[in-house]
Image (spheres, rainbow, N blue to C red):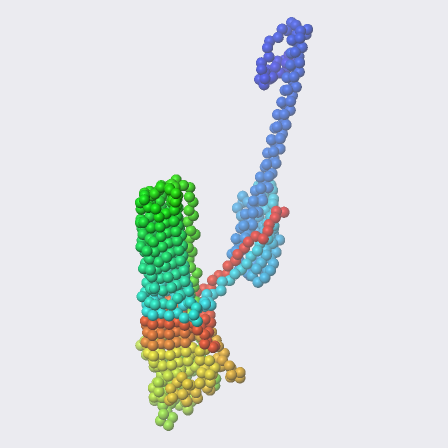
Amino acid sequence: MVMQYHQTSSIFASSMFTQAKPVDSQNLALSPTYQRGAASLVFVFLVSMVVIATTSEAFNTVKKTQEVGTAINAMSHAESATLTAAEAFRLHLISLDSQNIKTLSSTITIDMEPIYGSMTAENIVVLETSPDVFQIDTTFVNMHAAARSSAKLQVVYHAEIATPAPPGWPTSATVNFSGDLNINGGIELLNDGEAVDLIVDGDVDIGGVSVNPINELRSSGKVTIGSRVFIDSILADDDVELANTQSNLVRTMGDFRATGDASITTVQANGDIEIQASGRFENVSTLQNIIITSGGGGQGFLLAGEDIDAVSTGSIDSANAVGDIAFGNWYRVNNAVSMQDITCTSRYWTLTDNLSANGSLINCPESNGSLNASSGASNTVVPPAAVTPVSLHTPSIDVWSLRDEVNYFVEYDTSNRRIKVTVKSVNGLVDDAEYTLATFRVSGAPYLDYLCSIENSSGQCTSPSTPTLPLCFGQSLYNDCIRYNTGTNTFTVNPNQTAPGVMFFDGNISMGNGHSITTILASGNITTNGQFEHWAANRGGYEKICQAEASHTNGGVQARYNEAYSTHFPTNLCDIDTSSYIPTRTGNIGLAAGGVNPDLDINPDQMYTGGDIDLGASTDIVGAVLAGNILSTTGQVVIQGAVSAGAFGDERSGKHSLGNSTTIDFSDFGDFKPLELPDMEPLAPPAPAVTTVGVLWSRPL
């Protein structure tokens, strides 16, 4: 047994170390060799025992490590699932409005894929820290049966509900158009010495005009200017083309092109920039190419996301391109850096200080005492940030939303073929009382266009028995002031003066010669074609609106005007007890046209109608001009007040046009405030509330 074990051990040992030599079995017990063999046997035995023990311990360690790893994997899977649930719950909160957040259940089951385990959001507590601002405390619990593990995660969210306000009127002096705008003629924009903003949701074409300084021009379309004008900044979503224009900043998402003696301090574009102008361009950057072909101009800093091709210029301070740079003439270039190649006009060109290209220098001078010329460089040229869309909106223009503020609602009654007037907030008259316009005869003298309750078959008014209140006065006592054309649904008005207050015409209006101190609204279109002077109600103030001071009327009408309107004044605008005028935002409107008739019997599809305003001949308006569709000026026009056109009509009659001689002035006059206009009902559904949700803190439990 001993030998058998010895042999076996010797075989095992020889495999680990070296094979044992044969020994003399006859002298084992007595010789030193035998003694050495016995010692070797004991050593091998001990080594074998150590190896066996170590191997067994290693197997146990591996087994324990596998069990711990399996447990850690299970826990990690459960915990990662709670993180997934926390993000899913945050996205769910974003979809909720204020009321739904307030009424969250205390426990919610989160439906997730089976691989994530069974997930619930528990102990949900909602705290409204301020209106529409919340903290939501939630504990996510995951029971993972397959992994035989569980995990908890507490998360506190911060949520804010923001409801965008409907587009209101600009608070600065702004001319606002929706749709394409063409400007030709002598245009003046006045604001007590300050510049005016021009906002156009469409293309802008300003050609051959003399326009005083514009502060900012914003356009969602293309901007083309062919005049020697100054505009502080031009922001456009499409191409910009300027001839002879001066500006501090041009920013466009499209291409930019300058000709003539245009001069721009800073140009930023997403498309190609082409400079053919002789002016100075201080900072020019684009995501694409810069092409310079001007002869006498000069450029400061150039940055191109692609190539720079400077065919001809006065000078360049610094040219930097991600692509190639090419110089085509003998002009001064202080510095040029390219991540590709630089091509020069001649190897003998000396008007440069630094040329550095990652690629090659082609036809360029070599380095000398004053020039550093290097190819194979490692330049990094970072292209500019992209230009983003401009921010603009056009406020709603809907005269029907102002119906409750109207003192005289004028329409044509087809049943008796007469002009009908409904009154409201007029002293001495019953609200919503209806009248027709008729003629009185008193001692042979005519009283035309008076409010009448009953008239005879001859069209003479019998009630009231004496003339009380006219809708308007003609140019003399023997001229009417208003007529109606059934074929065109048009009221033609030639007033010496109109009833003070707010007047609504359900149809089109054609204004001829005359005067008016009345805010005029029309459901259709408005044209002026004579010598017309018009004041908004607020411009009239207490004396003219409430006391009927008649110095602005001619001699034959003055007495009748004062007698009628000093008694029948608009009660919503006049405080007689305190002898004061009550200005309203609607009272700052001179002319407004277009809207959606809310009567479903008349307008079942709720279509927008009217809205065109055409100001011709000689028109002087103190009050805002608001065209729901298209605005055009074709005469000698002065507007003292805000100007806006919405292009809300289903069929546009063309581009907005400011022509001939047009002056827009934003000056204040007492109770008249040109920038304070009524918020009309939005023509589109209101913008939905926006919920933002972030994590304040979280911790595993």
Q: Residue at x 33, y 53 (%)?
A: 313
Give the farthest residue toward the front. Answer: 369
Q: Nearer the viewer, residue 267 or 547?
A: 267
Q: Quadrant of the N terminus?
A: top right
* Residue 239 visible in image: no
Q: Where is residue 29 in the image (x, y as percent from the top left)?
A: 68, 7
Rendered image quadrant of residue 228: bottom left
Q: Position of residue 466 (x, y in %)?
A: 41, 91
Q: Is residue 446 left or right of residue 145?
A: left
Q: Residue at x 43, y 81 (%)?
A: 500
Q: Position of residue 635 (x, y in %)?
A: 32, 74
Q: Position of residue 478 (x, y in %)?
A: 34, 88
Rendered image quadrant of residue 488: bottom left
Q: Residue at x 43, y 64 (%)?
A: 393
Q: Is residue 355 left or right of residue 161?
A: left
Relative to 344, residue 261 above or below: below
* Residue 112 visible in image: yes
Rendered image quadrant of residue 648: bottom left
| Label total for image | 0
Give the farthest residue toward the top. Answer: 26
Give the farthest residue toward the bottom. Answer: 443
Relative to 382, residue 178 above or below: below
Q: Residue at x 65, y 8 (%)?
A: 33
